[in-house]
Image (tube, rainbow, N blue to C red):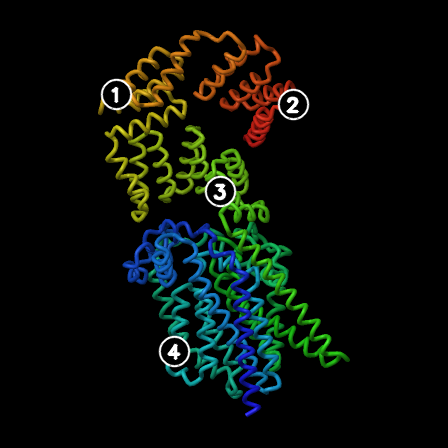
Amino acid sequence: MAENSGSTLSRLTHRLLLVAVLAAVTATYANHFHNGFHFDDAHTVVDNPSIRSLANLPRFFSDTTTFSVLPANRTYRPFVSASLAVDYTLGRGYVPFWFHLSTFIVFLLQLAGMYALYLDVLRRIRPAAEFETGNQISSLLAAAWYGLHPAIAETVNYIIQRGDIFSTAGVVAALALYARFPKLRRSGLYLLPFAFALLSKPPAFVFPFLLWLYVALFEPSRERRLYRSFLTALPSLSVCIVLLVFESAMTPKSYAPSILSAADYRMTQPFVLLRYFGSLFLPAHLNVDTDLTAFHTFNVSALAGFLFVIAILVAAWLTARKESTRPIAFGLFWFLITSVPTSFYVLSEVENDHRMYFPFVGLVFAVVWSLWLAFEFLLRHVSQPQTIRHVVFAGVLVLLAAYAFGTYQRNIVWRTDESLWKDDVAKSPHNGRGLMNYGLTQMAKGAYPAALDSFQRALLYTPNYSTLEINLGVLYGVMFQANEAAQHFQRAIQLAPDSDESHYFYGRWLYQSGDLPSAVRELETATRLNPSRQAAQSLLTVAQATGNTVIYWVDASLYQYRSGNYAACIADAQKALDINPNTAPAYNNIGAAYAALQQWDLAIQNEREALRVDPSFSVAKNNLEAYTQQVAQASPKTAEDWLNLSLHDNQAGLFQKSIQDAREALKLRPDYAEAYNNIAAGYEGLHDWDRAIEAARKAVSLKPDFQLAKNNLAWAQQQRDVQPR
């Protein structure tokens, strides 16, 4: 009775320790549940209408177009899409908490499955009761290290990469079921989580090989071990082949995972594995998008990578020969086998943090068991083993806490797009895509100069990147630099003529610019290339239907005014009046355009017409008062008057006249720093950077604390430096 009580207490203690590990992991990730959607989440989650209804659940298993709105990114992962639809429904929209919660629950279940698998392996090589505590503690430490490791944070934070978690958890569960419940093997129950894994992400196809490895190393039958393990793996291999053939048939021809050279990519992968191995111990260069590029020649790094793989193979082979070290061999072979899919199948990037997720399940186990054997050897050869035990375990807890802190910090990095891409640019300054994405975060908050600087730096490293050209077009569009915007949109189409994105964004800009026929043409092309892009279809419908509406032409005239195209502004507003002569905003837009052209009589006349139609139109009232005062003043009399007129002209886009007015102010006050600053601003508008710099320097020399002039000087110098020489 006493023995049974002790055994029960031991099981309870270690179960509580497992709960403590899971609780520690949960506490470490407590700050990630409200992190946003990032990167590929855009086309698979946020912009994907398919996940917004549970009615689409059957379609996820029969229609690959439901996975992504981008044809080149459509692949067959039905369980991933189905889970996203459930999360959307639970949150009643795109509420990050629900998306993170479901992913994290599977992550915790995987950790529990890993502990069960590790413990089974160790019990098979050391079944004696005297070793049970060591088996349990080392299994717990391996699961804890994995769960708290910062390299795992990307996969947990990156919503669409739950495919890695689902597939890894499925493989771990399948192997743990097979190992822990031998009597159920004939039922094939263990094949269910394997099927779930394979229908979540294809790298799970390695399961039959892992199962074969497990049986070969740890099953008790020593005779014909390899032959028996091969027969054991046959059912899972059959399921694997059937599902892979089915997935291949379901994957559309538009799927394009990479444009890299297959030979260059594969030559780089051994070095990538070496970097992954190093990250297990020192995760110093984790980031969302690496600037490591594929090797084009066999260099020193490539040689180091191949030597590393050979060393791992030799170590795995040697440790497989002795029973006590077979868990090391199992973990090392796991690391290599699970790295095969991403090492041979050519992908867009040569490395990613989330590619460590599956291989680290084995690598962590191999390293922990190696250290545990070394720890036991040390205890047998020291005079005070209890002291050593306490010191070592204290050190282990400190190390785990350090890894947990690193994970907590990675969660903070993943909070917003800006924090994520700022971290990426800092760690991968030569990554054009990272620079572009950071620029997008700046553009989103209206920091257009910072966005332009980031985009232009990205051009240095990715000069033929159509998406970057699209974003440059969008940026120049909101900066009202129409010629530059059009050039970049057309360049994007030239680089990717079959991409619906290039045509859609160009069409959207053309629509906003008032060029309705061209907008319709581009939007028709976009919808033809990708009929499932609802945004393009919706805008096309609006463009086709609103070509003769008042609202369209009023908005078009306002855009032309803001762009400095005053004649076009007047023409578009007149089209609105042709449809409805009682359109007050159209008269107001015409009045503003004439005022910018300093045709005050016509400006006043149109503002009065606007007020005749709508006496409460406050904008027209203010404009009429301002224009009347302008006429009453006749011409500027003081330097301040000329400066105000210069400022008004600059805001209206009349840069040359703004410069002339500022020079008139200087005739009355030669040391007028504000006038020189207006001259600098005018030349900036004309992109005459050298003259802008000269004027801004003069303003600063006259008024050293003139911050606005300092800003103009820095901006002009920056723009001159990035211009083609």
Give the foreground label among 1 and 3.
1
What is the C-alpha distance between the residues marked 2 and 3? 33 Å
Please identify the quarter of the rendering in which residue 691 is found: top right
At a point 33% along the width and 33% down the height, the residue shown is: 511
- Look at label 3 and name its amino acid: Thr
State left or right for residue 297 relative to residue 182: right
Residue 37 pos. (x, y %): 44, 51
Q: CA distance from mark 3 to mark 4?
A: 47 Å
Callout 4 amino acid = Leu
Residue 235 at x, y percent in the picture = 39, 78
Q: Is residue 676 left or right of residue 234?
A: right
* Distance from Cα at disc 2 to Cα at disc 4: 79 Å
| Mark in front: 2 vs 1 | 1
Residue 423 visible in rendering: yes
47 in relation to 80, above or below: above
Q: CA distance from mark 1 to mark 3?
A: 42 Å
Q: Which image quadrant for residue 241?
A: bottom left
Residue 613: mark in rendering: 1
Specify the label residue 473 is tagged with.
none
Label 4 Cα crowd, 10 Å radius (few <14 / some 14-19 / many 20+): some
Q: Residues within 10 Å of mark 2 (few under 14, many from 20)?
A: few
Image location (x, y in percent) of residue 598: 40, 13
Q: Which residue is mark 3?
A: 441
Which comes sooner in the sequence, label 4 or label 1?
4
Q: Earlier in the sequence, mark 2 or mark 3?
A: 3
Quadrant of the frame with the N terminus: bottom right
Q: Which residue is mark 2?
A: 704
